[in-house]
Amino acid sequence: VVTKDVKSAVIQVYRDGNTHNCRKLDPIGQQYCGQHYISPATAIRAQAKLFSTYLETFNHFRPSISNYCANILKKVICKSVFPRCTPGNTQVTWFNFTSECSKLARACANTPATAFMSLCDTNVHPHTYGLSTCVKPTAIAHKSGYCPPLPSQIKFPAWMLPLVSSRYTTALAVKDNLINSVGILPHCLDLAVSLICQSIPYCSPDGQRLLIGTTKQKCQSEISWLVLN
């Protein structure tokens, strides 16, 4: 736990690992993406729920698709969720999977697997970042009213900027989808959005550690409070 002063206000943040750590995927991830698929440890933690959701959907309709379609779909899922550390664990690469998307459209036509074509909309140009490079998120279009304004000096790992952008998009979608729901109080809605925003790790001032505004236990506790209120 780290306590920081921000414009005379004291906030509590939590350590979320180091900026330079890479490791193999968890056993289930290895099963789908390969034993030698190495990704930043923070990406594996941050994307675990999303990856699990994709696999549950994949396994549900696996009997209805061909092996060729299934193998292509695995590559699309893995490349869209996990960036890959280069040998030596000094750099991180987000892969372009345009080729796999083209094959997916043909090999999985008229099957439930086409639902995953939406992942192709998230495809990024292949880019390699320094694993420990921290930068200000100047390219992120901040949505006022969704996530709180970012401190002027905050930096994120450069490779994480696509995840930061998608997390803001999630916060925006949650608020838009729930804002007209009956029975949800404004402070509950704001808390839910705040939890999403706080789940984005950022660099410590020395660039060696990752800090985060919430923990899994704290998030679960506050979500339980939301359900009761």
Image (cartoon, grey):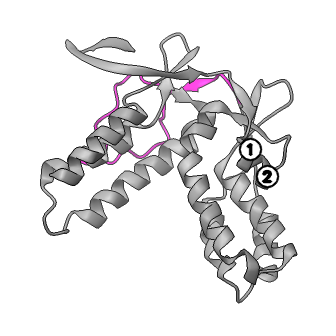
The residue lying at 74 percent from left, 86 percent from top is: 109
Residue 151 falls within the magenta-colored stretch = yes
Q: In this picture, is 174 found above or below 73?
A: above
- Say left or right for 95 vs 206: right
Q: Position of residue 84 (x, y in %)?
A: 75, 40
Q: Position of residue 217 (x, y in %)?
A: 38, 34
Q: CA distance from mark 2 to mark 1?
A: 6 Å
Which amino acid type corresponds to the residue marked 1 in the rendered image? Pro
Label disc, if present, on residue 31 of the rendered structure: 2
The residue lying at 15 percent from left, 69 percent from top is: 182
Q: Position of residue 29 (x, y in %)?
A: 72, 48
User: In this view of the protein, which residue sits in the foreground, 36 or 124?
Assistant: 36
Q: How many marks?
A: 2
Decide if residue 117 is in sight here.
Answer: no
Residue 83 location, quadrant: top right
- Local secondary structure at mark 2: helix
- The answer to whether the residues at label 2 and label 1 have Cβ atoms under 8 Å apart is yes
Label 1: how many Cα within 10 Å (few below 14, some 14–19, many 20+): few
Q: In this picture, is 131 found above or below 142?
A: above
Which amino acid type corresponds to the residue marked 2 in the rendered image? Gln
Decide if residue 205 is in sight here.
Answer: yes
- Say left or right for 31 vs 4: right
Magenta stretch: give its range.
Answer: 130-155
Residue 47 falls within the magenta-colored stretch = no
Residue corresponding to mark 1: 27
- Local secondary structure at mark 1: helix
The residue lying at 68 percent from left, 23 percent from top is: 21
- Say left or right for 48 vs 27: left
Q: Position of residue 10 (x, y in %)?
A: 23, 15
The residue lying at 63 percent from left, 36 percent from top is: 159
Placement of the N terminus among the 4 image quadrants: top left
Per the picture, the main secondary structure of the magenta-coloured stretch is loop
